[in-house]
Amino acid sequence: MGWIRPTAVAALLGATALLTSACNRYGYTAHIERVEGSGAWTTVRGWVVDPAAGIRGGCPTLVVSVGGHTFKNATCSLAAPGSDAFGIGWGARPDVEAARGRVAGQIAFQFLAGLAKGVHSLCLDVVPRDDSTLPDLAQECVDITVPADQFSSIVLDTAQVNGGILTAGGWRNRVVRTSTEGLNQAYWFLDGTKLTPGGSTVVTDVARPDVVAAHGAGIGTTLSMPAPAPGSHQVCLAWVWGNDSQPAGTPDCKTVQVP
């Protein structure tokens, strides 16, 4: 997905915050330097200064709020890339220390927020680690632009029968968070049976610029096949794991009537 960059205002603040960031109610000074994105993951990088580090000891609790989610670091080590966890990486920042005369820590933390395409406000707070009941008050906020949805989608738009032919159309956007999800593929289903493309059952991938404009990514898919027997039938579009015959998760379905 590429980097999720702060807005021009946030970037300008980042250029001067090394000297101007103020401490919060607990004495911490923290700054968000950049925000990156890759698929479903968001990574925040920056620094924090604790003037009472010699007294409090250890790393503090970092609190990130974005898109209605709140994340806190459970440990003082950075979560492994791709793990479903929130972590902090701690390291020296001699540039910050030189400017402030205090010991500073490099911070890097990642999380799964499942943000939608668009602009979101991301806020950072720092609280003492020995009191998880302290209220969260943002010390610094930046606007981030997410270029594409950070979650998978599969949508069935239309399904109808005309002239003895069943046609349907939809789209999907796959965002891989785990190796298991990487094996998911989109398939059509009719009355609970997975359809295998070939012969008179034609499945075609098509461009969907409207989906890309709205969600940042996505590709269309269409189905054409002889209509089934008269009566009510259910057409579905679903993710399927590997060679499984049943959907992985909830399919998107529509009912069609065959005269």
Image (cartoon, rainbow, N blue to C red):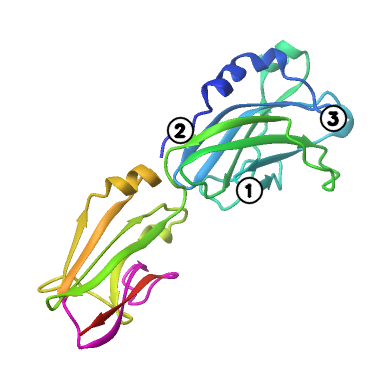
Q: CA distance from mark 3 to mark 1?
A: 23 Å
Q: Pick whichever, 135 or 102, lies toward us.
A: 135
Identify the residue shown where x is 42% and y is 53%: 176
Is residue 231 located in the magenta-colored stretch of the structure?
A: yes
Q: CA distance from mark 1 to mark 2?
A: 21 Å
- Give the residue type that dot 1 points to: Gly
Give the magenta-colored segment's residue range. 226-250
Q: Position of residue 94 (x, y in %)?
A: 67, 16
Q: Is residue 133 left or right of residue 20?
A: right
- Give the residue type that dot 2 points to: Trp
From what the image shows, is residue 18 above or below residue 106?
above
Q: Position of residue 17 (x, y in %)?
A: 66, 17
Q: Earlier in the sequence, mark 2 or mark 3?
A: 2
Q: Is residue 47 left or right of residue 115?
A: right
Q: Position of residue 23 (x, y in %)?
A: 79, 23
Q: Which residue is mark 1?
A: 68
Q: Which residue is mark 2?
A: 3
Residue 59 location, quadrant:
top right
Q: Pick whichever, 27 or 138, lies toward us.
A: 138
Helix, strand or loop for disc 2: loop
